[in-house]
Amino acid sequence: MDRRSGGGSRGSTGGRTQDRGGRRPSVDPAREVALETLRAVRERDAYANLVLPGLLRERRLEGRDAALATELGYGACRAQGVLDAVIAECAGREVADIDGPLLDILRLGVYQLLRTRIGAHAAVDTSVALARAEFGAGKAGFVNAVLRRAGERDTAAWIELLAPRDPIGHLAFEYAHPTWIAQAFADALGAAAAELGDALAADDARPAVHLVARPGDITAEELALVTGGEEGRWSPYAVYLEGGDPGKLEPVREGMAAVQDEGSQLVALALTRAALDGPDNGRWLDLCAGPGGKAALLGALAAIDGFQVDAVEPAEHRAELVRKATADLPVRVHVADGRDSGLTPGYDRILVDAPCTGLGALRRRPEARWRRTPADVAELVVLQRELLAAAWELLRPGGVVVYSTCSPHLPETVAVVADAVRRTGAIQLDTRELVPGVPDLGPGPGAQLWPHRHGTDAMFLAALQKPR
């Protein structure tokens, strides 16, 4: 299933074709936006969740058109591996041998045929229209032929034909994940590995929008009333939205609320709830702060007690995002490498939300699953261990560090924590007690959230206390 993406547009058009009357063939605007999103992802390694909203605003698409463009653009990115396997079978060639712009159209068409309720006639005809507008009649005929072959089988039949026979590989194909990621999820589920299908299915679904109500400014109840949302189940500051553009909401525009997954809220809250050995002197640190969501929640909570948060971010452009997210809060932003921050030791609480593979947030980053490889893990694990070691040096005796990743992958989670405990003699707290009321967090002492269990990203968190 892990086939290479199509190449560049060998001899493809520099502009759109016209019909014999000099007019451009009619192209559906929602599908055109979805197609341009796929193209940006393939050609520029762009992020779909950044490209597509901008295109919707630029083309002024709203309502059903915006919803269709979003479903097709994000959905085709998520399902890329499955789509490519079907395309290769129907075209009789590897997708790497298909011109990139043409492959984008085929992915869009096959996605509609196999993973939406759009009728086959509409899926084929609109895709052919896109190809004719871009390339002319010749390649439009190729698109027509491939899609008609793809439409000869339903989704279940294609899975039966193309999916690997081993159980994990089969589920990976069915739910559009690389096999190595499905295996990582199975390993993390451990004794609950029978839930793998549910985990992959939840990861393949479009997530709800989560908001965080800024403590001291607005309550979750008030935010839910203002936005028409629903109060969250686990975080006292979370609100769920059905959809729409949260940036248009007045509380978000005024800085009283922000978009933040409920799992990320729980990570920040866990840091503030951990029992210290000795008084809390109000020195808190977010060692990996960009883009600033957790630093903002920590800052708002710190402000209530008159505490101070330091936030470290090595990239200036991301540090600026932290500054914007934490404006008017007691947060000092430092542009520095967290492994050598130059900060004075003695912090009471430190958050290490370490850079990771992001396997726990794949549902929010549609194309990411096809970009990550197992080779990415080793370098990240080294960085994660170094950051946790640096945090330990900055922590006062009796203080607590919370290590978290947006990934359930064991080498990035329990293995990193176990290494730190072995090297430092850290006291590993039962982190599950720091997220009260949340069930099914695993065997402990760390806590693992899951989309299929909790509706959050698959955040891992572990709390370590420094002995006196």
Image (cartoon, rainbow, N blue to C red):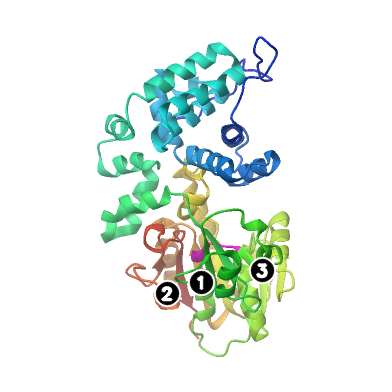
Residue assigned mark 3? 311
Question: For the residue marked with disc 3, what is the amino acid?
Answer: Ala
* Badge 2 vs badge 1, beta-carbon distance below 8 Å: yes
Report x, y in % for residue 227. Answer: 59, 64
Disc 1 to disc 3, C-alpha distance? 15 Å
> For the residue labelled by badge 1, is the local secondary structure a helix, a strand or a loop?
strand
Q: What's the CA distance linking mark 3 and mark 2?
A: 23 Å
Residue in the foreground of this view, choosing between 29 and 388? 29
Mark 1–mark 3 CB contact (< 8 Å) = no
Query: Which residue occupies the foreground of this view, 367 or 228?
Result: 228
Which quadrant is home to the N terminus?
A: top left
Which is the main secondary structure of the residues drawn in magenta?
helix
The image shows residue 109 at horizontal and vertical percentages of 47, 28
Residue 402: which disc?
A: 1
Q: Which mark is residue 431?
A: 2
Is 250 included in the stretch rendered in magenta?
Answer: no
Please rate how many residues cluster around mark 1, counting C-alpha atoms within 10 Å: few if below 14, some from 14 to 19, many from 20.
many
**What amino acid is at disc 2?**
Thr
Amino acid type at image mark 1 = Val
* Kind of element beneath mark 3: strand
How dense is the environment of label 3, judged by Cα within 10 Å: few (below 14), some, or many (20 and up)?
many
Q: How many marks?
A: 3
Residue 370 in percent (x, y) is at: 48, 40
Q: Residue at 46% of width from left, 18% of height from top?
A: 144
- Would residue 373 appear left or right of 196 to someone viewing this image? right
Magenta stretch in the rendered image: 259-268
Distance from disc 2 to disc 1, alpha carbons, whole Å, reads: 9 Å
